[in-house]
Amino acid sequence: MDLKDFKFFKDKDISIIRQDLNSIIAGDTSSLYRLIKLDKDGLALADYKKKEYDDLKDIDDSYRIDFYFEDREDGSYLISESPKDFKEELSDDQIIEVGKRIGEFIYKFHNKNLCDKSLWDKLMNNRINLFTYNYNMSPFKSERAYIVFDFLNENKYVLEDRQEGKILNFNRLDNIKIGKDLSFFIDTENATSFTDPFYEFRSFNVDDDLLLLKYAILRGYFSDKIPRLFYRILAIYTIEDIISNKYFSDPNADITDEIDKILAIYDDFETLKPGWIMRLEERLNSDHENRL
């Protein structure tokens, strides 16, 4: 299939990035395009997704995805256009600006999708009990694991009555695309319901990538005042995410490295604030402009 045969692409300088039986991913200097051939069911789904994304654009007009339909002799096609990702190339000031705006966007999305009732704390307690059982039954033991499990037992009460809602469920920022013009797109393909909104940020502690962007998102989400309760809950979700993922692949795994990683993030739980945030705040506070 030649993309130049489509009216939409006729005057665009594009190259194919990926192609399979159902879709083509292509790009130019500023945008990514996805081309899908639609059957009857696909057309209904496309209409639903377009409405869903239009609702997200209503939250913030910097949220960017556009849809185009093109009819041809061989069928109907849906073309989506979203920003090509330039977040690795942005200046610190640009990262702060767009990160805070993304945080505000996520907060508004969460608030629009809250539920009245919640069984979240029971679900999380079941997960914690399961990986605690796996650890107790495992032949592998860490001398410092008690610090992590003591923290969980002493603090999991804060999950009681956490309100559930829908989260975007982006994975370590991979699903957040930021354009050169600071427009942004968050893919909702992995969005999930009946989840504590704070669980959205569970992976922020897992790696050292894009720390300023993560921090700016949190500052935007909490209107510049990140509460102590959030840090306590984030610690629980960080532990759960790291250990559960390890045991998911092997219930008898050795989690010594995971325990050490958690304790390094939190300085053996001498503080609730992750070390990377404290270091970043020190650097930003020493900046005379104090840009955040």
Image: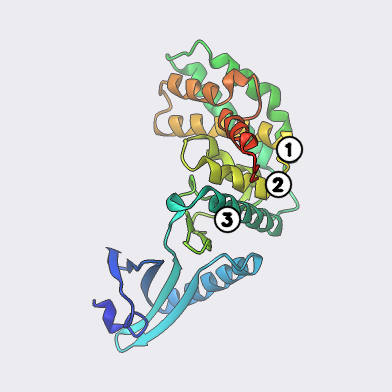
Where is mark 1, residue-wise? 227
- Of badges 3 and 1, nearer the viewer stands 3
Q: Amino acid at mark 1?
A: Pro
Q: Amino acid at mark 3?
A: Val
Q: Amino acid at mark 2?
A: Phe
Task: Write the residue at 60% across / 46% down.
Answer: 216
Instruction: Give whichever of 179, 263 is nearer the camera.
Output: 179
Asked if the residue under mark 1 is in contact with the one under mark 2, i.e. CB atoms within 8 Å, the reply is: yes
Q: Estimate the spatial distance between the alpha carbons at disc 3 and disc 1, rounded to whole Å.
A: 21 Å
Disc 1 packing (10 Å; few <14; some 14–19; many ≥20): few
Mark sitting earlier along the chain (2/3): 3
Task: Write the residue at 65% across / 35% down.
Answer: 285
Mark sitting earlier along the chain (3/1): 3
List x then y, in percent, for residue 151: 64, 21
Mark 2: secondary structure: loop
Image side of residue 34 versus residue 229, left or right: left
Asked if the residue under mark 1 is in contact with the one under mark 3, i.e. CB atoms within 8 Å, the reply is: no
Instruction: Give whichever of 18, 63 is nearer the camera.
Output: 63
| Residue 182 visible here | yes
Looking at the picture, does residue 55 appear above or below residue 263? below
Where is mark 3, residue-wise? 98
Where on the picture, by quarter, is residue 281? top right
Looking at the picture, does residue 112 appear above or below residue 225? below
Looking at the picture, does residue 211 appear above or below residue 109? above
| Residue 196 visible here | no
Looking at the picture, does residue 172 appear above or below residue 4? above
Task: Write the residue at 73% across / 35% down.
Answer: 229
Disc 3 packing (10 Å; few <14; some 14–19; many ≥20): many
Image side of residue 112 versus residue 31, left or right: right
Where is mark 2, residue-wise? 222
Asked if the residue under mark 3 is in contact with the one under mark 2, i.e. CB atoms within 8 Å, the reply is: no
